[in-house]
Amino acid sequence: MRSCETLLQDLQSGVCDAALGALYAPDGASEKLDAARERAIRIVELFQTYFSPRQGAALFSGPGRTEIGGNHTDHQHGHVLCGSVDMDMLACAGPNERDVIHVFSEGYPALVVDLHDLQPVESEKGTSAALVRGVAAKIRELGYDVRGFNAFVTSNVLSGSGLSSSAAYEALIGNIINHFFCENKLDAVEIAKIGQYAENVYFGKPCGLMDQMGASVGGCVAIDFRDPSAPAVRKVDYDFSASGHVLCIVDTASSHADLTDDYAAIPKEMGAVAAHFGKAFLRDVPEADFRADIPALRQECGDRAVLRAMHYYDDDRRAVEEADALAAGDFPRFLSLVNASGLSSELALQNAWSPSSPAQQAIPLTLARGRELLDGAGAIRVHGGGFAGTIQAFVPLEKLDAFRAGIETLCGEGRCHVTRIRPEGGCLVAE
């Protein structure tokens, strides 16, 4: 491992350009490589400021993730399609020969985790410290000698964007510990499961595994959650840059606050339908049995629960078909499926706006405007949990400028973020 000083010199001289280019400028764009190099140099310089220029150090990345297919299917043990994006958390980190983890994240208070006590801390719930403690605890439980390290972290994963900054952070910390203390023996799927454990047990959020898989595995990933403890993961080989489209994540400037009941109602209502058949999850209920019993389910569970179950079956199937379309290189078919998924989320799943706040319908409004701007091209859908937050659009390159201008006139300047599916998940960038 290089000293921090040597790592900085190598970055400045271009020794690390190949590694940076592969991750941040795969199209060879010099301006992207220059920006990546400048960002890496700055984070190493900040590490030097907070710690020591002579300490051994390396660069690590944890990317955000985007849900591509399968909206609210994972919690019913269904299929999803997700991918890592080129917005990430970048850290300069190195062992400190102590049993304490120090992390400085740009724009946030410093955190310290004492490795002598790795039990969950109630007052840490909902904080980054909880994620660090949880990841370290789980890796130590697996038999590895986790020791202390110092890290300085910067992020361009948009907060509240639906790109899952928490999963990016978990992938980042998991890769740092894996590299320094586990001889890189943990694979990407194991790191994802460790991140989910930290988020469930230490952070206090009962999330599924999709976010962590998308951030850790990288590229476009199809996941089957029939057995959530051992999900089947398939990387889908498709070069999105060759599609003639870009991926836009649009912040609709609507708040996720006070939407817990709306989110919780979806698995609750789907679970009520499954319970009618003596099952806990819709994955275990044959679709034919569900459809045959719709009249009785309307009376027992209500129409919205029936519609949400219909969405589950249709979107679960679509997630598989989307992955197959990409694997076959059939991008028009993929776009058609994405659009169908978006309409199903709006009309059957009903997660585009909250019935408790009917005046706030930023997602339906932005989707409507986006469809006007796309004029039959590309694809557009709600992104992630829904009710507020973000939408996702695959926009033809020739329509990008007009699409972004029209959307930002509606939502505000800088709220249409152009990103791409990146080929790698959490990783060591350079050392």
Image (cartoon, rainbow, N blue to C red):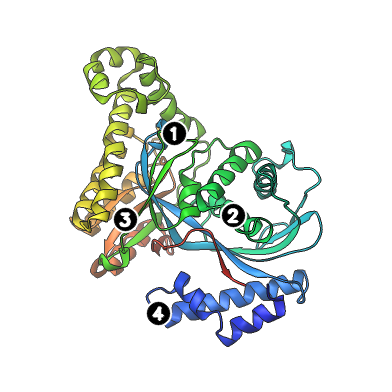
Horizontally, is 166 left or right of 417 in the view? Answer: right
> Residue at position x 40%, y 25% from top?
281
Q: Nearer the viewer, mark 3 or mark 1?
A: 1
Residue type at the position of mark 4: Ala
Residue type at the position of mark 3: Ala
Report if residue 283 is visible in the image: yes
Q: Earlier in the sequence, mark 3 or mark 1?
A: 1
Q: Earlier in the sequence, mark 2 or mark 3?
A: 2
Work out how far the residue at label 4 is from the one at label 3, CA to CA, in angstroms.
23 Å
Q: Which residue is mark 2?
A: 185
Q: Which element type, helix, strand or loop, lies under badge 1?
A: loop
Work out how far the residue at label 2 is from the one at label 4, CA to CA, in angstroms.
34 Å
Q: Earlier in the sequence, mark 4 or mark 3?
A: 4
Question: Measured from the top left, where is residue 139 in percent x and y?
Answer: 66, 47
Q: Nearer the viewer, mark 2 or mark 3?
A: 2
Q: Which residue is mark 3?
A: 393
Work out how far the residue at label 2 is from the one at label 3, CA to CA, in angstroms.
37 Å
Q: Which residue is mark 4?
A: 29
> Residue at position x 71%, y 42% from top?
124
Question: Measured from the top left, where is residue 308 in percent x and y?
Answer: 33, 29
Horizontally, is 297 left or right of 24 in the view? Answer: left
The numbered dot on residue 227 is 1
Q: Within the image, what quadrant is residue 271 found in?
A: top left
Packing grade of label 3 (10 A; few <14, some 14-19, many >=20) is many
Q: Which element type, helix, strand or loop, lies under badge 4?
A: loop
Work out how far the residue at label 1 is from the one at label 4, CA to CA, in angstroms.
42 Å
Q: Within the image, what quadrant is residue 183 found in?
A: bottom right
Work out how far the residue at label 2 is from the one at label 1, CA to CA, in angstroms.
23 Å
